[in-house]
Image (cartoon, helix red, strand yellow):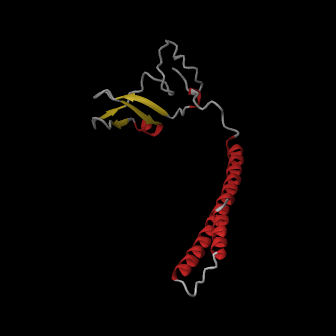
Amino acid sequence: MTISEKVAYLKGLAEGLDLDTSKSKEAKLISVMIGILEEIGMSIEDLEENTVALGEELDAVSDDLSDVEKAVFEDEDEDDDCCCDEDDDFFEVDCPNCGETLVIDESVLEEGVIQCPSCKQKFALDLSDECGCGCEDDDEDGDCGCGCEDHDHQ
């Protein structure tokens, strides 16, 4: 039984008692209370209907968002954790003063001088024993074994 049905039942009981609201203060009070309960019941029913409608609209928006996500992200690789996808424009350098490992980008590498954020000391980057990709040039014929083809080892 809904709230509106319960209020209607209560209203019927009050009418069955044949309360005269013009003569009795109690009858007038009961009549006003039943009127207020009717308004509350209608408000609650409206809220329930709106909640159902909003839920349906939210489901539709969720479905649309899912379609958009599929369209936008369908071309991305499934394996985002692969080390091959890392950006090659960043390099790791150890600070000669404090030993802190710093990650620098290509613009800092081109400047040749870096200030360590830990110890605040500046130092020059020595890349003489490294090829352009950051790997060490260990072989006598200049082959570092890194497999990259973007630079010459001489």
Q: Nearer the viewer, residue 34 or 19?
A: 19
Q: Quadrant of the N terminus?
A: bottom right
Q: Residue at x 42, y 38 (%)?
A: 108
Provide residue 71's location: percent of width, then percent of height.
Answer: 72, 45
Q: Residue at x 32, y 33 (%)?
A: 123
Image-based side of 53 in relation to 124, left or right: right
Provide residue 104's location: percent of width, then percent of height.
Answer: 43, 35
Q: Nearer the viewer, residue 110 or 18?
A: 18
Identity of the residue furthest to the bottom in this view = 22
Q: Nearer the viewer, residue 2 or 43?
A: 2
Identity of the residue furthest to the top in this view = 140
Indicate whether 68 appears above or below 76.
Answer: below
Provide residue 137's location: percent of width, then percent of height.
Answer: 48, 18
Q: How many marks?
A: 0
Indicate whether 42 appears above or below 114.
Answer: below
Q: Residue at x 35, y 36 (%)?
A: 114
Image-based side of 15 in relation to 100, left or right: right
Image-based side of 82 in relation to 127, left or right: right
Provide residue 113's location: percent of width, then percent of height.
Answer: 36, 36
Identity of the residue furthest to the front in this view = 17
Name the quadrant containing residue 119. Answer: top left
Image-based side of 139 in relation to 150, left or right: left
Name the quadrant containing residue 102. Answer: top left
